Amino acid sequence: MTIRPFIPWPDRRLRSMAAPVEAIDDDIRALWDDMLQTMYAMPGVGLAAPQIGVMRRVAVIDCSSAADEPVRMANPEIMASSVKLREHDEASPNLPGVSATISRPRAVTVTFLDETGKQVVRDFVGLWATSVQHQIDHLNGKMYFDHLSPVKRRMLLKRAAKLARKGG
């Protein structure tokens, strides 16, 4: 297992749609292992493959307090979302030093391939739902700040660029 480097914003891959996974094989399992190690080292509660420059529809999440309940997903898709929203402060290692409060559905039902290659349908609530939506956004070439108004998005990106010029 390897901790992988994050690609920096505005790398074009962060704006690109990731390719579907055809089958769960040893390469995908090794990628999941690297992604989990990278996510735990961050530390964070989710990671999508495009964030480390791998353009595949692969993501991991673990919102457990002990960081011991990882969920490995390939080709995740949201099937249903709650009407009730939840606000959470979101950030990304691809754009360090900044964050924003984002409103997303409080609960989602997601279908994905698990580590055995089986199609799974699972409900996620609270932080788990926020994280899985955040990762699916990455797989679709979207960043969390795309959920902000144009003015707030410009301010956040300007602040991030200023931090980057200062060296973090």
Image (cartoon, rainbow, N blue to C red):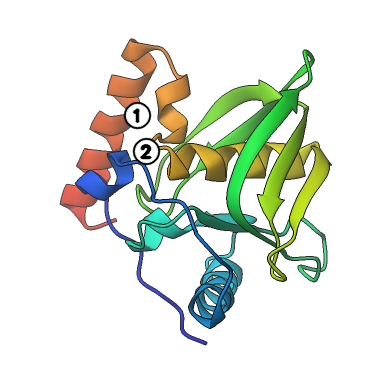
Residue at 35%, 47% in the rendered image: 95
**Quick one: 64 or 114, which is closer to the camera?**
114
- Dividing the picture into quadrants, the one containing residue 16 is top left
Residue behind mark 2: 141
- Tell whether label 2 touches label 1 (CB within 8 Å): no
Q: Is residue 94 left or right of residue 92?
A: left
| Residue 129 sits above or below residue 152 on the image | below
Report x, y in % for residue 36: 59, 71
Direction bottom: furthest residue: 1
Report x, y in % for residue 128: 75, 45
Which residue type carries mark 2?
Gly
**Quick one: 97 or 102, which is closer to the camera?**
102
Residue at 79%, 15% in the rendered image: 84
Sequence-wise, the earlier of marks 1 and 2 is 2
What number of labels is visible? 2
Separation of residues labelled 1 and 2 (CA atoms): 18 Å
Direction front: furthest residue: 22
Residue at 57%, 27% in the rendered image: 101
Q: Residues within 10 Å of mark 2 (few under 14, many from 20)?
A: some
Q: Is residue 137 left or right of residue 14?
A: right
Q: Is residue 111 left or right of residue 27?
A: right
Q: Which element carries disc 1, helix, strand or loop?
A: helix
Report x, y in % for residue 150: 33, 13
Residue behind mark 1: 156
Report x, y in % for residue 167: 22, 58
- The quadrant in which the C terminus is found is bottom left
| Residue 139 sits above or below residue 47 on the image | above
Direction left: furthest residue: 165
Q: Which mark is residue 77?
A: none
- Dividing the picture into quadrants, the one containing residue 59 is bottom right
| Residue 106 sits above or below residue 137 on the image | above
Which residue type carries mark 1?
Leu
